[in-house]
Image (cartoon, rainbow, N blue to C red):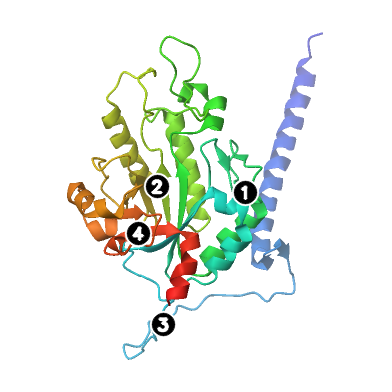
Amino acid sequence: MALTFTTKRKLQRIGMVALTLLLAGIVVWFCWVIWLERYVVYTDEGASLNFDLEDPGTGQLAAPPSSAETISIYFNEGENAIDATYELAQISGYYISGDDLKDDIAGTRELLSTLGSGTAVMIEVKNIKGSFYYSSGLSDAVYASTVDLAAVDSLIQDMNSRNLYTIACLPAFRDWSYGLNHVSSGLAVPKKGYLWVDDAGCYWLDPTDSGTMSWLYAIVGELRDLGFDEVVFTDFRFPDTTNIAFDGDKTEAITTAAAKLVTTCAKDNFAVSFVASDTGFTLPEGRTRMYLQNVGAKDVASLVAQVTVPDIAVNLVFLSSTNDTRFNDYSVLRPIVTAQDDQAKN
């Protein structure tokens, strides 16, 4: 049914009145909010209105400080002094393996209590199966059933609170769990639809895959937030086999991945380092170190001559299983159980 002219006019008038009232209401509401703003009190629990507040009125400009005014500066000195330079330095200390966490975490904690401030301590935080030894917040994290996660969490907190130089150690490209759940990031058998498996039953990840690198970035970020000073990647290489589908240059792939990790994750007070499979490993520029393991004391001098790093004493670290003094001129980490022998000597 068509509306008459008179009805249309009435509807137009009603619409104009309604629109005018709406605009007037918006203006009144806006002015009301502006007026109320002076009575808003912000606290940790949120914002509230307090009409007992006095009108603050017009503010007063702050006067510039007198040129004779002095400001006291306090320097933190002694064994707990903060290193403002953030330069990497030579380290000496111990490492805690997954077996230490599994078999005798109480004894490990007792040995840590004897260490002096600034001692370097490396702890294994994840194994080749992809299982974490601490309570990770990452969505792809799985946990080792052989360790007490809460006890390891407490141990890590204690390490940081005692001003030790803390290092987290974990495998890089050897990760059964992540490979199982992210097949596209793994190294596959040529012309097959499944991933290659090593003798330990582990999958290996592709260093050129974006998913692989994002996974490593996420782990490093979490470890840095937990208070670690450095992270060290083991298995930072391709597996020793020709039965994987990879057509690129393997050396270039590893070098590029290392550089990306240092560029993305290293900070002024955080280092990203690598256990090298051989002395020819190319250490990226930045805050990083090269670690060498399974080196006999008699071979130390000859290996040092083959390594190219900015500072041998600082950027090269030996993981030694003994207290042989031929390692002492360099950065060196030894099993935590050897701390008993060191304490006995002192």
**How far across and down, in percent of the image, does residue 93 sit?**
41, 63
Q: Do the residues labelled 1 and 3 touch (CB within 8 Å)?
A: no
Residue position marked by numbered label 1 in the rendering: 135
Mark 2 or mark 3: which comes first in sequence?
3
**CA gap, disc 1 to disc 4?**
28 Å
Q: Nearer the viewer, mark 4 or mark 3?
A: 4
Q: Which of marks 2 and 3 is in front?
A: 2
- Farthest residue, direction right: 1
Q: Is residue 51 left or right of residue 225?
A: right
Q: Which of marks 1 and 4 is nearer the N terminus?
A: 1
1 or 3: mark nearer the eye: 1
**Which residue shows up at 52% across the image and 70% down it?**
162
Say which residue label 2 marks. 265
- On the picture, is 194 further left or further right than 141? left
Q: How crowded is mark 3: few (under 14 residues within 10 Å), some or many (20 or more)?
A: few
First in residue order: circle 1 vs circle 3 = 3
- Labels 2 & 3 near each other (Cβ < 8 A): no
Q: Is mark 4 on a helix, strand or loop?
A: strand
Q: Which residue is pictured at 61% across the width and 52% down the height?
A: 103
Front position among marks 1 and 4? 4
Determine contact: label 4, label 2, CB under 8 Å.
no
Q: Residue at x 52, y 75 (%)?
A: 59
Q: What residue type is labelled 1?
A: Ser
